[in-house]
Image (cartoon, coloured by chain):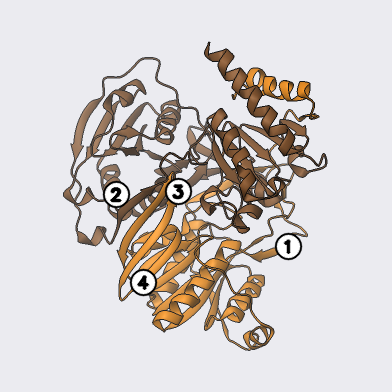
Chain colours: A orange, B brown
Amino acid sequence: MNILVCVSYVPDTAAKIGATPDGSALQLQGVKYILNPYDEFAIEEALLQREKHGGRVVALTVGDAAATEILRTALAMGADAAAIVTDTTLDSYGVAVQIAEYARAMNADLVLLGRQSIDHDSFQMASTVGALLGMPSISVVSKLDIEGTRVRAERDVEGGKEILEAELPIVISVQKGINNPRYPKLPDIMKAKSKPIETLQAQSVPARSRHIRYEVPQQKRANIILGDSDADIAEFVRLLHEEAKVI
Amino acid sequence: MTTAVYIEHRAGSIKRASLEAITAARGIADRVVGLCIGTADTQTLRTYGVHEIVAIEHAMLTRYSSQAVAEAIAQYVRSAAVGALFLGATAQGKELGPRVAVLLETAYLPDCVALSKEADKLVAVRPLFAGKIRATVEPLTERVVVSLRPNMFTARPAETPTEPTQTTFSPELSQEHCRVVVTDVVRNEGKLDVLEADIVVSGGRGLKGPEHFALIEQLAAVLGGAVGASRAVVDAGWRPHSEQVGQTGKTVSPNLYLACGISGAVQHLAGMSSSKVIAAINKDKDAPIFKVADYGIVGDVFEVIPKLIEQVKQLKQSTAS
């Protein structure tokens, strides 16, 4: 089975992110970048599927050259090869086109991604890549079984879960709960350093949308903090009922 | 401009996220078309001021397939003079939106929280980095597909109901479009979902053990809300992952989010900071949750929650009588 796992290099959750006073750009100085947390589940799932079906796992990222760091993590976890498409100007659609091209070229049977990257939080990559490849896709998957070319998956929806059936080739985005990502061991980390990482030039794709302004949201919270006396609890209930009108 | 809204419904009953999308569409478009797979509640669509109802009919749509539905919507939009397609950013909408956008070769603006017009062009605001930044985004294509974050737009009936024209659209679909289908849906019966509830009451490590979540359940019950949980208690196996709020869990924006015994780690805030009102109970007055809260009680959850339950019960009785 040819498995492509897509990973992204994102600001750490705790990073302080600002915008320039005129709103034209983000301020990301000093921000630490990490492997997108959901992508760890995607890498693990790729490795588990390879253990079951044989084949090869390739990790791919699209972005700044510094993102090579997370490809080393994927290699240390057990990916066979890795590739980076260097570009920092593409919009999400443009990134999807690079992924789709790579998947097509390697004849991927299974494309795995994390359910969202924690920078743009747009939950769109699996469906976009699936549509570009003319493949089915399933997003936010918490259980995946593949037998031959038959795929059975579960995904969380509002108020329950859906059971889905599909066929390979397919694009799947995964979420927490699907597996427990392994920690790479020191020898694997050392070995990963000598595994090859292919560097590719991005094909140019005209953007379909553009960010025109950034702002840091202004907190408009009432911030009334009370004690735990009976009178304070009564006031808390009154505030929620009469001021906020939410109960 | 005509805006089409994908109407998500279950056995005719329309999801609130779709009513919110209709209301938002009315604000920016001259004409609103409601696109339904099969038949949805016509009376509600009339009340919400939809000008045309299009029932998409095809034998291959009897079992839900995101691929087939996206293809059908795209075919309709191509056939009609539709400038924008709106969807609720629900589990379904988040899969359909990007797919339809690729098929139509248009921009997709995901999970938007505000819409406006700048120089007669639709622009949207969407949160980035778990809400740390609000970005204004413009489409660079003529048509646009937009998904709207649930509970960020108010669903409001139209001032005057419409008499919508009703038409049927028959897309051309083949087996090729149905390579993924939903074969079953398992409902958490009798349990409100954190994604759909107006009130979410969440518990964290401050509850000290799974057995004490009965307190959270009781409080949620008297408030008519859903039970949520922090990552710590889900990882500890006290609560199911479906209840987890925050990064690696769900992003919720209820009218009231009440955090009990949750310190408010940045990963948790990522999942609830767009809630309309945030309230918190925590014994540590320096807990970060209080920095983002509208209302807070510094106190022990084991002492405060039972009293709170009593007071809310009294309030409900006095408002009911």
Nearer the observer, disc 4 or disc 2? 4
Look at the numbered disc 1 and give the secondary structure of its residue: loop
Q: CA distance from mark 4 to mark 2?
A: 24 Å
**Pointer 4 with pointer 1, Cβ within 8 A:** no
Mark 4 Cα within 10 Å, few/some/many (few <14, many 20+)? some
Residue B296 placement (x, y as % from top left): 74, 32
Question: Dot 4 lies on which element?
Answer: strand
Label 2: few (<14), some or many (≥20) within 10 Å?
many
Q: Where does label 2 land, which residue?
A: B69
| Alpha carbons under labels 4 and 1: distance apart | 37 Å
- Total tally of numbered discs in the picture: 4
Residue assigned mark 1: A32
Residue at figure coordinates x 25%, y 51% from the top left? B63
Q: Which of the two labelled residues, at mark 2 and mark 3, occupies the earlier sequence position?
A: 2
Residue A146's disc number = 4
Q: Disc 1 marks which amino acid? A: Lys
Q: Amino acid at mark 4?
A: Ile
Which of pointers 2 and 3 indicates the residue nearer the eye? 2
The quarter of the rendered structure image containing the N terminus of chain A is: bottom left
The span from disc 2 to disc 3 (Cα, nearest Å) is: 17 Å
Horizontal placement of B266 versus B35: left or right? right
- Tell me which corner region of the image, top left, top right, bottom left or bottom right, holds residue B289: top right
The quadrant in which residue A73 appears is bottom right
Q: Residue flagged by tag 3: what amino acid is it?
A: Tyr
**In the drawing, does residue A106 fall left or right of residue B173?**
right
| Residues indicated by labels 2 and 3 sit on the same polypeptide chain | yes
In the depicted view, which residue is nearer to us: B233 or B107? B233
